[in-house]
Amino acid sequence: MSNMPEWLRTAVFYQIYPQSFRDANADGVGDFDGIIEKLDYIRGLGCDGIWLNPCFESPFGDAGYDVADYYKTAPRYGTNGDLCRLFDEAHARGMHVLLDLVPGHTSVRHEWFRESCRAERNEYTDRYIWTDSVWTEPDGMACIRGISERDGSCAVNFFSHQPALNYGFYRPDPQKPWQQPTDGEGPKKTLSAMIDVMRYWLSLGCDGFRVDMAGSLVKHDEDGRGTVALWKKVRAFLDREFPDAAMISEWGEPDKSLEGGFHMDFLLHFGPSHYNDLFRCGSPYFCGHGDASEFVRRYTSSLEKTEGRGLICIPSGNHDMDRLARTVTGVQAKIAFLFLLTVPGAPFIYYGDEIGMRYVDGLASVEGGYERTGSRSPMQWGRGKNAGFGNSDAEALYIPLDPDENRPNVEDEEADGDSLLSEVKRQIKLRREHPALSNTGRIEFLYAEKNAYPLAYIRELDGERLTVVLNPSDVDASFEFAAATAEVVYTVGGAPRCGDGRMTVPAMSAAVCRVM
Ligand code: NOJ
């Protein structure tokens, strides 16, 4: 991890979904000024890093993941200058801000795409993946067709209004000249254009990027070799010009992303990680009747494969998943947070998860959210108008609030030492006080058996060694443990007992211990 920015070794992140965080100008949508107002809250929670979901000019058909201009912020959030002010205000508080880079696709409204649709050849003809006839579909990929002057169909990446940028094919089919090699002129220019975008925002003070769908840029690249090679070029650029920029990938395969030069990769709620077994499945482990063993097996194998090369992040949630509180609540949520805040990799807290914000059922889709919309409702700051989100009319809120009159809010939870918010604050403080719990510390699982409790692991760094035990089930649970005593450093819901070669962790409790 030699190339890791120093600040990332201890960073704790807070994810801000800008449209839903705080609306300072009362138009019903969150904005940069609103975020600036709340920086002290985030810092007070103990977080010193921010991931800001896309905030660029966009028709918002996918909440901003359909970028129409990489160089201009969406006016509803504020100007480029306002975003720079946010960087400055964050830096003044010792915080860092990651922007969301969407390198794989744009909106159909992006100027590059409009130009690319033209019949006559121009600078942008090869910026996207086009076949050579409107009747030919790009192999295995969905496409846009019938809207261009140009004769061709254009591959898309996610929704059918997000045309795929052209970084080339790993093994282009020689019979299909429209499949360009990664070192072709078009793909090379696309990469260089994206590097220009990164350079622009890094020069203005952003501290790095969370990169959207980072693993799928090169097409027909099943093993990811082409995409890894592409990111290595980006790494070379960053090492030269911005060595302190943090790069965090939405890839879900850390052995590949870290090889490509990312510092950290997210475990995702889809793919092979079994992340969902813990928080979001029929029987999540943290609800007391689940299984963490398969998750631990995969996680350990990823750690072994990536040893020393970077970090793996297990987030509390994000704008694409059900809210944590849809499944895990009460003491179990506190235990789940103790897990999230004592594992390696920089923790990421999705806005509102720290107060147990709920998934809002039954909402119509907003900005391409579909079932994700319920996890994107306005932040609940207090008991006042619109729960303190902003002063617009309730009808103007771009997503309605959680209608439950007992919805959690920051103000109440700050006043209650026993709230989830107070608990999360204490846990972040604990993490900061103990090197062994920090992002780069080692982890070794002591007990993670099939359908069994507790979950136990050791964390270790710089000579400090701590044991973490978690039992979110409703019965006491024990495991083989040689030491006769353990000094309890932190508990949720009760302290474990040692004796007769075992440690017993009381029902609905968790602890961090120093073993003598
Ligand atoms: C992943 C993002 O997190 C998600 O919100 C978005 O819809 C897709 N990528 C497409 O960019």
Image (tube, grey):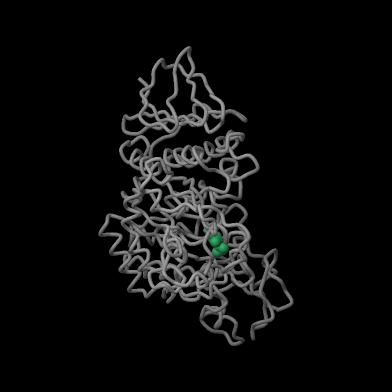
Q: Can residue 1 be seen in this view?
A: yes
**Residue 393 falls left or right of residue 427:** right
Residue 428: x and y, percent? Answer: 36, 43
Q: Within the image, what quadrant is residue 78 found in? A: bottom left
Residue 509: x and y, percent? Answer: 48, 31
In this view of the protein, which residue sits in the foreground, 415 or 161? 415
In this view of the protein, which residue sits in the foreground, 105 or 324? 324
Quarter of the rendered structure image containing ligand 1:
bottom right
Farthest residue to the top: give it.
500
In this view of the protein, which residue sits in the foreground, 172 or 237? 237
Numbered circles on residues, count: 0
**Residue 387 falls left or right of residue 244:** right
Farthest residue to the right: give it.
135
Up the image or down, 121 lies above or below 144; here it is below
In this view of the protein, which residue sits in the foreground, 51 or 185? 51
Q: Within the image, what quadrant is residue 88 found in? A: bottom left
Residue 152: x and y, percent? Answer: 67, 78
